[in-house]
Image: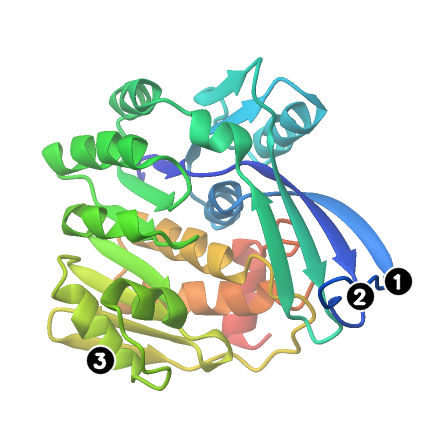
Amino acid sequence: MAGTVLVCGAINTDLVAYVDRAPEAGETITGRSFEMHGGGKGANQAVAAARSGATACMLGGVGRDDFGDARRAGLAAEGIDTTRIQVFDDVSSGVALITVEASGENRISYIPAATLAVTPEHARETVESVRPALVLSANELSLACHQAVFGWANENDVPIVFNVAPYSDEARKLLPMVDTLVVNRGEARALLDEDDENCPAEELGRGLVSLGATRVVVTLGEDGVLGISGDELVHVAGANVHAVDTTGAGDTFCGAFAARLNEGASFEEALRYGNVAGALSVTKHGAQPSIPTRTEVERMRSGS
């Protein structure tokens, strides 16, 4: 049986407004509907990993408030270990304000709050206690927390899947510690200081390998995903789906991809599975509500 996946990152409440188009500066737009869901890249990835069959434990932070209570309950209902979530009396839970256009594109304003209050000491205690088989992390906790967790993982030969989102320059310091780096085109260009918007994904990926990551995955939206591992180059074409909301698609890929890697699947198989999971997620509204189960992913893969 595969060991635990420790997922590190934000636990947010997503407040989602559905509109025909996003407002310009100073403009008010009347929306079509409103929804509230659990979110945060870390929490989304944990749910995706759990729904793909992984035993997942969440490292993050919430406030002692209604949002925090609801998010912990929601993660626990997914079978995720929530005992390592740090709860704060004097800091609010994280919130994301999301505007989704009719085209499916989204704009997000993110307030991390308790996520950045998680202490490196708590992070180190968590990884030492859980002793995970794989670490999956979005770029949401502090640099010191990442260094604590990644340092333990390196010391104990535990693989790390690191998603550099949301992007920060500090993430460069972590790349030599990472086994598998997951980025989109924009994040890849930012890490490499690449100005050319048309720079080929393969060139971006190989450039990131030169910065220290062992393997690199470049997610390409509707064009699928590109993976580089040594001399191995894998391009998985995008699935033919109708997108209604792209929120959480990258998170779904990361969680599903990591779950399969943790089971011992090959790099290519994990990419193919994650690609289908991410594609399925854009066919429904909301980040966590849209994350497919393993059964749904395998059904689409088999064409049934």
Residue on which disc 2 sits? 19
Q: Amino acid at mark 3?
A: Glu
Amino acid, disc 1:
Thr
Q: Secondary structure at mark 2?
A: loop
Q: Is residue 285 visible?
A: no
Residue of label 3 = 203
Which element type, helix, strand or loop, lies under badge 3?
helix
N-terminal of the pair, mark 2 or mark 3, is 2
Secondary structure beneath disc 1? Answer: loop
Nearer to me, 101 or 249: 101
Look at the picture and state if 13 lies above or below 234: above
Mark nearer the N terminus (2 vs 1): 2
Q: Is residue 109 left or right of residue 269?
A: right
Q: Mark 1 against mark 3, which lies toward the viewer?
A: 1
* Disc 2 to disc 3, C-alpha distance: 37 Å
Q: Is residue 114 visible?
A: yes
Judge whether 96 appears above or below 84 on screen. below
Q: Compare residues 98 and 295 and report the one nearer the observer.
A: 98
Label 2 is placed on what type of residue? Val
x, y percent for residue 164 = 35, 54
Identify the residue position indicated by label 1 in the image: 30
